[in-house]
Image (spheres, helix red, strand yellow):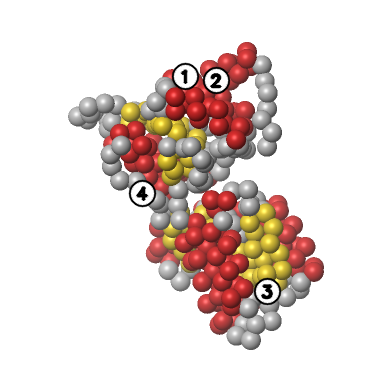
Amino acid sequence: MKEKIFTAARGLAMAAMALTASISLASVAQAADCKKQYTIGFSHPVGESEFAAALRKKVVKYAGENGCVTALIDNTQQSNLESQRATLESWVIRKVDAIVVLPVDAPALKGLMKKAQAQGTKWLTYAIDVEGADGSVGFDNVRSGDLVAKDALVWLKKRYPSGGVTAAVTTLTPLVGFAGRWDEPLKQFKAAGLPVVSEQDCADQSCGLQIAEDALRQHPDLRVFIGINDDAAIGALRAFTNAKINPDEVYIAGQDGTREGLEAVKAGGAYRASVAILLDDLAKSIINNSLAAITGKGEKSQADVELGVASKPERLNALIAQYDE
């Protein structure tokens, strides 16, 4: 993405609006015996997603429970670089103690990162590693890819013991930190002799639908589809449904554990699994890793992931319930 250039007046106006918005969403620290109060800003660029909304609420919750932390929440939506930059600039002006950000465009924000660090604000990245950052917060993408690949191959061995089918895997190559989500399925499918006939960048429902439709036209034996996330996989599910392929013959799975993905697993049929990120773990790590970077003390953590499948209904319901808390 190219860095957008806008006037100083417009930039200041947006920064002011972002500052007002973030303050209104700040957690109120509980009374506690704190030697110091810390302010941590969290910026997720896809604020309209249910996953991001649920995570933000939990970040505010755990900041409040800590008692010594105030959490500021960015309301950027649709990966709008200008909006995200304005919020981050407002936090730098405010001299918050730490910023945790999934950058829309890491190179475009590099100068702001250096400015923040020069004044003592710690800059941590979410879900990806950025050179020069003070730390990161995330989840195990290699384990995510491994869980879904192994589950798919177990199903494949039972349903198609003699083979004769093909697979598709979606990727998102610009986000190298997520590579485990597609590298593991690709590696394990190759070792198992399962041909992958489609390997394309896709992380939303529209491209998932299109990729599956195209692949089915060219490869009528396509029966396995692994999405880098639930959105891509849900799109593929629609393609198989529209093609009136027997769901008993198909394995579709996503990653992230969105409510829609987990509900699709619960409904039964072709959507057989979603690797869910444990939101409470992730929210806690955002607070704890930030404090570790600020103080130089404390343990850093990474959120665990879990395979949501219909054969474990209690755990599946618990993963869905993450969005209701």
Asked if residue 319 lies left or right of residue 164, the reply is left
Q: Which mark is residue 190?
A: none
Please identify the quarter of the rendering in which residue 246 is found: bottom right
User: In the image as oriented, which residue stretches furthest toward the right?
Assistant: 217
Q: Amino acid at mark 3?
A: Pro
Give me the residue at 36% from left, 37% from top. 293
Q: Amino acid at mark 4?
A: Ser
Residue placed under numbered mark 1 in the picture: 93
Q: Amino acid at mark 2?
A: Ala
Sequence-first disc among 3 and 4 = 3
- Real-space CA distance between mark 4 and mark 2, rounded to the nearest whole angstrom: 32 Å
Q: Position of residue 49 (x, y in %)?
A: 56, 43
Residue placed under numbered mark 4 in the picture: 301
**Comparing labels 4 and 2, the label whose residue is closer to the camera:** 4
On screen, residue 90 above or below 210: above
Sequence-first disc among 4 and 1 = 1
Q: Amino acid at mark 1?
A: Ile
Sequence-first disc among 3 and 1 = 1
Residue placed under numbered mark 3 in the picture: 195
User: In the image as oriented, which residue stretches furthest toward the left?
Assistant: 33
- Real-space CA distance between mark 2 and mark 3, rounded to the nearest whole angstrom: 50 Å
Mark 2 near mark 3, Cβ–Cβ under 8 Å?
A: no
Give me the residue at 70% from left, 52% from top. 206
Residue placed under numbered mark 2 in the picture: 15
Sequence-first disc among 2 and 1 = 2
